[in-house]
Image (cartoon, rainbow, N blue to C red):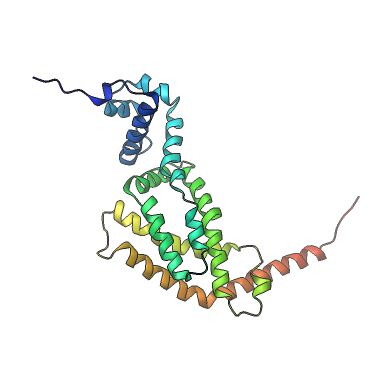
Amino acid sequence: MKKIENPSLRRMTPEDRRAQILSAAIEYFSEAGFASQTRELSKRIGISQPLLYRYFKSKQELIDEVFQVVFLNQWDPLWIDTLRARQVSLEERLVDFYRRYAKATYRPEWIRIYMYAGLAGMPLNRKYLQIVRDRLLVVMCEEFREEFLRGNPRKSRLIGAPISPREIEMAWNLHGSMFYWAVRTNIFKAGSRFSFDQKSRDAINLFLMGAKSIYPEILSSASEEKNELLQNTSESPSYTS
């Protein structure tokens, strides 16, 4: 009888072995969470635990690499170019962006690892949320300003102000609705009969209709708060020794 070779026992290049461990770790952590043991991971791969630690010095180093591959390496700078392509309508830019973003990120292992990391109180989520805020939501808010202040006589003054916390929160509302679709689909297994394109277009249109009516007021309020703060600062007595 021909002996079946276990692929895990084959001699592999260091690069291939590291890639094998990392791929197995992504699948393992997405199933069992981060409290699981590397001993069990080693058994799954068919290697010894000391061999695993030859490639990753600690469990945390392995987790950090999983985060890099699953989250950071998926980030595509072209997403921002898509959002800033003002020759295309804002609606179509957002639909195109979320189509690309969902394809890269809203996968089962991505969602499950993200949720497990949050439940474990790990900093991975906070780090990723900060990246989303700084690289994505700020750009969205800039495009919202350009769209919703068109024809506004105060546009030149309002559009140059720093992005306000309320604007960021509104952008989170849109982004969060997309994320919840991914949670329903990959965690609760309760996907919609409608396609993601249809769901995202509906959510985007609903957001744009509401944002159009209140965005000038949001910017005016932020501008007034800033002016009031500057006035109070200038009127405050100074004390020198």
The one nearer the camera, 216 or 160, is: 160
Q: Residue at x 53, y 63 (%)?
A: 84
Q: Is residue 105 visible?
A: no
Q: From the viewer's perspective, tell me whether residue 200 is left or right of residue 146.
A: left
Image spot of residue 137 (x, y percent): 52, 59
Where is 214 relative to 42, above or below? below
Where residue 188 sits, quadrant-wise, is: bottom left
The quadrant the N terminus occupies is top left
Q: Residue at x 34, y 64 (%)?
A: 197
Q: Residue furthest left?
A: 1
Q: Residue at x 24, y 64 (%)?
A: 193
The one nearer the camera, 224 or 6, is: 6
Q: From the viewer's perspective, tell me whether residue 136 is left or right of residue 20.
A: right
Q: Residue furthest right?
A: 241
The one nearer the camera, 62 or 83, is: 83
The one nearer the camera, 193 or 79, is: 79
Image spot of residue 56 (x, y percent): 43, 26
Where residue 101 sits, quadrant-wise, is: bottom left
Q: From the viewer's perspective, tell me whether residue 43 is left or right of residue 65.
A: left
Image spot of residue 49 (x, y percent): 35, 22
Where is 47 relative to 71, above or below? above
Q: Is residue 26 visible?
A: yes
Image spot of residue 218 (x, y percent): 58, 72
Q: Residue furthest front?
A: 87
